[in-house]
Amino acid sequence: MNVSSSAATPTSMFGTKKDDSTGLSEAALGQEQFLTLLIEQLKNQDPLNPVDSTDFTAQLAQFSSLEQLFDVNKNLAAMQDYSATTNRLSALDMIGKQVTFTGSGTVSLGEEVGSVPLKFDLADNANQATVTITNETGQEVARLDLGYQDAGSRQISWDGLDETGQPLPAGSYNFQVAAVDEMGNSVAVTLYGSGLVQGIETDNDTGQTVVVLASGQVPIDEIVGVRDN
């Protein structure tokens, strides 16, 4: 489509060139800018060489496509908001329950001494597996020798006692599992943390729903199990 008799602009308004009369990048045009350019091009067309009807129809088709894309984006944003709201509402049922999550071997010890489940996965059979438990300062407080363990999902119970058999104070603790096969090679371990859900919040930076535990926040998509306390 010609703006004047001496200079021509590309037929498509979605190229990467810049229109000098507007200072707008054609690759970043929105609905209003696109329509403004289309009108200006019609107003400034060469009377001796008017715009071809086929080109004009193509421009209108592009504008229609642009409108549809904006509508799709708005609908997707609305769907994301709805999904986030649904996640928060469904997550409310977790409050007061114990959850298991991936990515961390963090567990919570309550005021009353009781068994705390320590869950992990072994990629292969382990000829020897050892669990080391540390407090919030990183100090080792207990060590459990498990001996031989089959590959797959494993869960053991920790009684909340230190290495001398004394009850440990309530709080958050971390556990690590060191496992080796019969050749002495390390076996890959995946840890699962657990804790009592105290609340549900939304991360201000990501907008993601997070579960609030005594040990911190856990993204809801990392929760792999929920059970009554």
Image (tube, grey):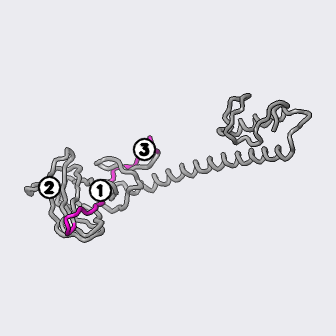
Q: Is residue 20 left or right of residue 42?
A: left
Q: Which residues are magenta?
A: 181-206
Q: Is residue 221 magenta?
A: no
Mark drawn on residue 76: none
Q: In which quadrant of the rendered image does the N terminus lie?
A: top right
Measuring 41% from the left and 46% from the top, which residue is drawn there? 201
Residue 193: give its label.
Answer: 1
Circle 3: residue type = Asp
Q: Is residue 29 visible?
A: no
Q: CA distance from mark 1 to mark 3?
A: 20 Å
Instruction: Say what secondary structure mark 3 lies in.
Output: loop
On-image quarter of the C terminus: bottom left
Q: Of the two numbered discs 1 and 2 on the same chain, state the one appearing first in sequence.
A: 2
Question: Going from the N terminus, do you reach mark 1 or mark 3 first?
Answer: 1
Q: Earlier in the sequence, mark 2 or mark 3?
A: 2
Element under disc 1: strand
Location of residue 20 (image quadrant): top right
Residue annotated with mark 3 = 203
Say which element carries label 2.
strand
In the image, taking residue 10 as reference, residue 100 lies left or right, namely: left
Provide residue 58's location: percent of width, then percent of height.
79, 47
Contact, mark 1 vs mark 2 (Cβ under 8 Å): no
Residue 165 vs residue 59, the one in the foreground: 59
Q: Amino acid at mark 1?
A: Gly
Compute the Cα span from label 1 to label 2: 17 Å
Q: Nearer the viewer, mark 2 or mark 3?
A: 2
Mark 3 surroundings within 10 Å by alpha-carbon count, few (fewer than 14), some (14 through 19), many (20 or more): few
Rounded to the nearest angstrom, the CA distance separating label 2 from label 3 is 34 Å
Residue at image point 84% right, 47% down: 54
Label 2: which residue?
142
